[in-house]
Image (cartoon, rainbow, N blue to C red):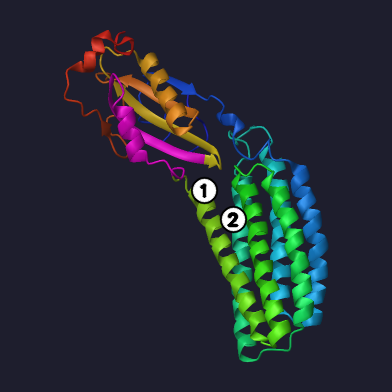
């Protein structure tokens, strides 16, 4: 009996499952995940740019009394941390499976994404608090200094965004770092506009408004990272895959009478996996049915890491108490010419 031994509840091979015909279709699933393809040089190049400019901007922000520049610098600091976490997680996740970690440490990237998201939310809360205080008592802001500093920041972020966009954004980890940099680019544009307004009109509250805009971007990006990483950690179905629709399609295949104990999840971003218990007609060819279902999952859903337990409907050993929804063949036609289908002939 072959099963996935990652300790996830509901996998075939747990007590209560039958000992019928089984098979695994691993395909290229093990090649998914954090990123053998992500180019560390691009991430490192973006990191050097960001750290160098961040220190300059923070210093000028203090001199110009600009909360928008200081918040931009803080956002750049989270950008730097995001890239550092991405680089570390990429190395950890690339380690081969061993011991009790049968999938390796692929979810290191998910933990990195969650940490990035939490950092963004905390910083956003801080800058909202500071912005309210400055709205009531706006300080004098050097608009000309804010304008030229943030304008150069736009150029730096354009280059950094381009560098990270060339890495493997199929990884939630790398995508998190990319979103950090992209949001920072938008923030610099807002601060540039605020600096121009202050420079030309003397409206100092424009700096605070720009800071609130930066905080809003942080909230949006942070929430998105926590949401997506949380779905992976909670083993929710991958975005875009409806387990009910998928189960119904499997149950409609030739010779299949029922599909239950269907579980579809992501080991890490870009690495979907599936397990299910499939019941076929008494005279069906379990191995042929398994191959047919694996091909459907590969071609229609991009799922290549599958564990399917396939039993005959009249097999006394299959589980008597299915967990979760049962997907049953609903065709009313006579055996679909199943007698002529090699999958339905032992």
249 falls in the magenta region: yes
Q: Which mark is residue 166?
A: none
Residue under pointer 1: 233
**Residue drawn at 75 percent across, 43 percent down:** 40
- Find residue 185 and report its image quarter: bottom right
Local SS, label 2 = helix
- Find residue 36 and report its image quarter: top right
Q: Is residue 9 visible?
A: no
Q: Pointer 2: residues within 10 angstroms few (<14), some, or many (20+)?
A: many
Q: Which mark is residue 114?
A: 2
- Find residue 152 and report its image quarter: bottom right
- Magenta-drawn segment: 237-266
Instruction: Kindly indicate whether the residue at mark 2 contacts the one at mark 1 (C-beta within 8 angstroms).
Output: yes
- Can you give x and y, in whole percent of width and height, for residue 125 in the image? 59, 73
Front in this rendered view, residue 184 or 152: 152
Q: Is residue 159 above or below residue 29?
A: below
Apparent side of residue 280 relative to residue 86 in the rendered image (left or right): left
Looking at marks 1 and 2 on the same chain, the residue that comes earlier in the sequence is marked by 2
Q: Is residue 264 visible?
A: yes
In space, the residues marked 1 and 2 are separated at their CA atoms by 10 Å
Q: Is residue 257 above or below residue 116?
A: above
Residue furthest bottom as drawn? 137
């Amino acid at each position: 009996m072959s099963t996935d031994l990652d300790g996830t509840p509901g996998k075939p091979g747990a007590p209560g499952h039958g000992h019928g015909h089984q098979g695994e279709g691993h395909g290229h699933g093990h090649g998914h995940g954090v990123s053998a393809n992500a180019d560390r040089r691009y991430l490192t190049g973006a990191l050097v740019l960001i750290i160098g400019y961040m220190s300059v901007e923070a210093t000028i922000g203090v001199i110009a009394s600009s909360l928008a520049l200081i918040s931009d610098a803080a956002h750049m600091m989270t950008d730097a941390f995001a890239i550092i976490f991405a680089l570390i997680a990429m190395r950890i996740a690339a380690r081969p499976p061993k011991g009790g970690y049968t999938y390796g440490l692929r979810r290191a990237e998910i933990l990195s994404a969650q940490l990035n998201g939490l950092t963004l939310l905390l910083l956003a809360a801080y800058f909202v608090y500071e912005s309210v205080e400055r709205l009531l008592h706006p300080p004098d802001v050097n608009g000309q200094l804010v304008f030229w500093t943030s304008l150069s920041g736009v150029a730096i972020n354009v280059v950094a965004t381009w560098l990270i966009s060339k890495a493997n954004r199929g990884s939630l980890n790398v995508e998190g770092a990319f979103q950090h940099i992209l949001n920072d680019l938008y923030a610099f544009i807002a601060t540039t506009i605020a600096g121009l307004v202050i420079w030309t009109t003397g409206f100092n509250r424009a700096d605070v408004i720009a800071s609130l805009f930066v905080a809003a971007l942080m909230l949006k990006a942070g929430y998105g990272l926590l949401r997506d990483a949380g779905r992976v950690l909670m083993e929710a179905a991958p975005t875009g895959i409806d387990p009910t629709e998928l189960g119904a399609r499997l149950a409609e295949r030739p010779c299949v009478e029922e599909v239950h104990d269907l579980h579809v999840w992501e080991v890490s971003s870009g690495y979907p996996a599936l397990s299910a218990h499939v019941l076929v007609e008494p005279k069906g060819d379990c191995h042929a049915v398994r191959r047919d279902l694996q091909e459907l999952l590969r071609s229609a859903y991009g799922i290549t890491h599958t564990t399917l337990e396939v039993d005959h409907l009249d097999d006394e050993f299959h589980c008597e108490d299915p967990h979760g929804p049962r997907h049953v063949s609903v065709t009313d036609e006579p055996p679909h010419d199943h007698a002529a289908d090699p999958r339905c002939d032992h």
